[in-house]
Each structure stands twice: as C-alpha cells, then as structure tokens.
Amino acid sequence: MLKVRGLEVFYGPIRAVRGIDLDVAQGEVVALIGANGAGKTTTVRAIAGLTPFRGEVSYDGRALAPNSAERNLRAGIALVPEGRGILGSMSVEDNLLMGIYCRRDQADALKDIERMYERFPILGQRRTSMASLLSGGEQQMLAIARALLSRPRVLLLDEPSLGLAPKISDFVFSLIADLRKEGMTVLLVEQKARQTLKVADRAYLLETGRVIKSGAAAELAGDSTVSAAFLGGTSAAQPGP
C-alpha cells in the first residue's frame, strides 16, 4: 500500500534522512523506532507531504509529490503529528469539524463525529470546552479522533504516547491495537520500543537517518541491536559521510 525508496530529506546542508527504504502493507501496523533525532518524525512528515524530499514515495501505486499534504489527506493518508497539532483556541467540537472538511458526505461525516464521542466519551463531555483546556491525554484523543474523521486508509501516528501518564499511554497503545483489528493501516513512530513492538507487525530501527535493522516486530523485540539502541551499547550502524 505504501512504498518508500531512497528517501532523503535535507534541512539546509544537513541530510536528516539518508536513503530510507520501507514498505507498509494494507492492514499492517508498522513501527519506526529509534532514539530522539534518528529521523523518524522527518520520515513521516515527508510521507504526509509536509516536508520536501528526494526519492520515491508511492501510495496504492501512485507517486506522491513533496509538499502535497492536502492532496495526500484527500487520498487517504492522515497524520497525527508530534505535539498533537490541535487548535487550542477552538472548542473540541470545532476541532473535530476540522477533521471532516475534506469530506463530501457531510451528513455521514457529522454522524461520524457522534461516533467519536462514543469512542472517546471524555470528548463528548468536553465538546464545548476550549481544546487548550484539555489534559495532555485528552488532547491526544482529540488529535487521533480528528484524524480518523477523514476516514483514512493509512494513519500516520507520530509519538502518540509522548508526555502522557503511564495509564493514558497504555490506553493509546490499546487503541492502536484496536485500530489494527478494525483493519486500519498504521505507520507508528515511537521511542517506547517495547510497547510499540507488542502492537506492531513489523518494525524499522532508525539511527542517524538510516534504517539499521528491520523485520518482524516479535523478532526485533529480542534483538541485541534494538537493545543497544535503547539501553546503551554499540550500534550496528556504520558512520556515514
């Protein structure tokens, strides 16, 4: 469903992503794991169309162009960004209405908002509250609900557990597992490797903008390279130019 070949992203003279290849099949949860600064967020932002890139990104066999975020969203790729990206000066309900702006079936879209209130009851209770007044966990629920309202075929989740209390973090990972059961295709960026590998089908370990390990999530969970990346030790990656 999603294919990335030779992805490179530059910030000025700095090559933040160095020729990444990855694949995401329909119905999979695929994880990008790695330490802070490994290039995970840059990779998903490029796929979403928010960051210029070199290389090939294709979705359902069609090439995606850089800087084409709205077109990608309409095609079925939704991003829940790091930091959530909610509109704090707007109400919960208005934030959710932003999630359906690209849909033509407005009557069904409004019904989907009600379904989101059923899925996330706290959002229903806070529907008239300013989004900035929500807790961190509530804001993350709002960001995910808003993305789901576009009815994506591929959901990009960037650090969804970042800054959350353990109980809320567990809820987020449980939600990802539920979405997988419902057939949602997910590309998940996370630093919490152990929890991530429990919900993912496959994973890619990134370091300094490169993939240094990939495979089935269950196999990577016990891999020494993954342990070294997160617990300290010697990495298998070779220094780049």
Image: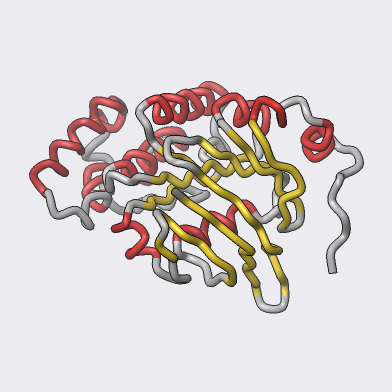
* Most distant residue in the right direction: 234
Q: Is residue 51 left or right of residue 125?
A: right
Quarter containing the C terminus: bottom right
Q: Image height check: is 197 above or below 43?
A: above
Q: Is residue 231 left or right of residue 187?
A: right
Whole-percent x, y for residue 89 in the image: 32, 53
Please report the residue visible at 63 percent of the width from the left and 29 percent of the height from the top.
Answer: 197
Q: How many marks?
A: 0
Which picture quadrant has residue 68?
Answer: bottom left
Please report the residue visible at 19 percent of the width from the left and 53 percent of the height from the top.
Answer: 103
* Most distant residue in the left direction: 107
Whole-percent x, y for residue 174 in the image: 47, 23
Q: Is residue 67 left or right of residue 98?
A: right
* Most distant residue in the bottom direction: 13
Task: Give whichever of 11, 211 is nearer the camera.
Answer: 211
Q: Image height check: is 113 above or below 168?
A: below
Task: Give whichever of 140, 4 is nearer the camera.
Answer: 4
Please report the residue visible at 64 percent of the width from the left and 30 percent of the height from the top.
Answer: 217
